[in-house]
Amino acid sequence: MHHHLDRPSKLHFHDYIEICYVASGRLIHIVDKDPFVMTAGDLIVIPEKKEHLLAPLE
């Protein structure tokens, strides 16, 4: 699944592993209160039940 991120997501978690790949642009991904700035080509694996949110930087 993919989607265009035009506003911050809510803090949430899943009962499955999430893989986030940035195809273009920049975003900040906060996982367990640790921020990660991601740019095009970056990939992050979020373990199940880890609170996280995403927000665009542009």
Image (tube, rainbow, N blue to C red):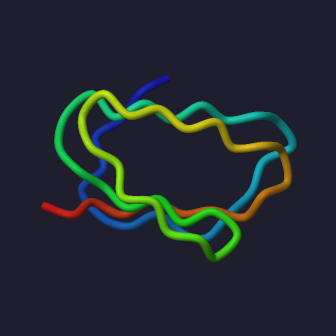
Which of 54 and 32 lies nearest the eye of the viewer?
32
Total residue callouts: 0
Q: Is residue 48 left or right of residue 45?
A: right
In the picture as drawn, the residue positioned furthest to the left comes out as: 58
Q: Is residue 19 left or right of residue 32?
A: left
In the picture as drawn, the residue positioned furthest to the bottom comes out as: 33
The percent coordinates of residue 51 (x first, y second) are 72, 64
- Can you tell which quarter of the image residue 16 is in? top right
Please report the residue visible at 41 percent of the width from the left and 27 percent of the height from the top: 2
Please report the residue visible at 47 percent of the width from the left and 32 percent of the height from the top: 43
- Can you tell which quarter of the image residue 46 is in? top right
Name above or below for residue 45 compared with residue 52: above
Q: Is residue 3 left or right of residue 4?
A: right
The percent coordinates of residue 31 (x first, y second) are 63, 63
The percent coordinates of residue 42 (x first, y second) are 38, 34
The percent coordinates of residue 50 (x first, y second) are 78, 58
Which of 16 and 42 lies nearest the eye of the viewer?
42
Please report the residue visible at 12 percent of the width from the left and 61 percent of the height from the top: 58
Name above or below for residue 20 compared with residue 26: above
- Can you tell which quarter of the image residue 55 is in? bottom left
Q: Is residue 30 left or right of residue 49?
A: left
